[in-house]
Amino acid sequence: MDEHISCIVCLSAEQEDLMPYTPEEKSRAVTRIRRIRGQAEALERAIQAGASCAALLQQIVAMRGATNGLMAEVMESHLRETFDPRIKSKAAPKATDYDEDLEGVMKILRTYLK
């Protein structure tokens, strides 16, 4: 899993200067991962305890929502890292058409991930 969230969680030597995420974004990603881990452990306990299928499905849906939220954050970070012209040029961050375009793409992706 660490390999797939490298654009938020991990720093590589060649990307260190290009990483667009903030400590707050990294903290949110780690918090989401911990929440997903807790949900998976609760699901395991529920299965072992013989919980009803309805209760199990409810927990699975909650896990899916948390995973999709993490995926949206990682996707946004990846898109910024890959396509934001200010990152590679190290230009001062200011609002651009890029920001509006990215927000439009992320709105569509978040809708799809729900």
Image (cartoon, grey):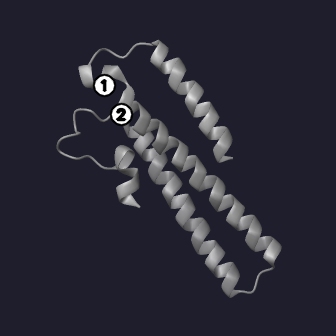
Q: Which residue is mark 1?
A: 87
Circle 1: element type: helix
Q: Tell me which amino acid carries mark 1.
A: Ile
**Image height check: is 106 above or below 4?**
above
**Looking at the image, which is closer to me, 104 or 2?**
104
Residue at 41% in and 31% down: 80
Labels 1 & 2 near each other (Cβ < 8 A): yes
Residue 59, picture quadrant: bottom right
Position of the N terminus by quadrant: bottom left
Residue 6 in the image, given as x and y percentages of width and height: 35, 50
Residue at 51% in and 26% down: 102
Q: Is residue 40 left or right of residue 21?
A: right
C-alpha span from label 1 to label 2: 7 Å
Residue projecting furthest to the left? 13
**Image height check: is 91 above or below 71?**
above
**Looking at the image, which is closer to me, 22 or 85?**
85
Q: Which residue is mark 2?
A: 81
Residue 44 in the image, given as x and y percentages of width and height: 62, 79
How crowded is the residue under tag 2: few (<14 C-alpha within 10 Å), some, or many (20+)? many
Residue at 52% in and 48% down: 71
Circle 2: element type: helix
Residue at 48% in and 36% down: 76
Q: Tell me which amino acid carries mark 2.
A: Glu
Residue 104, picture quadrant: top right
How crowded is the residue under tag 1: few (<14 C-alpha within 10 Å), some, or many (20+)? some
Residue 92 in the image, given as x and y percentages of width and height: 31, 14
Residue 16 in the image, given as x and y percentages of width and height: 22, 38
Q: Choose the circle earlier in sequence order: 1 or 2.
A: 2
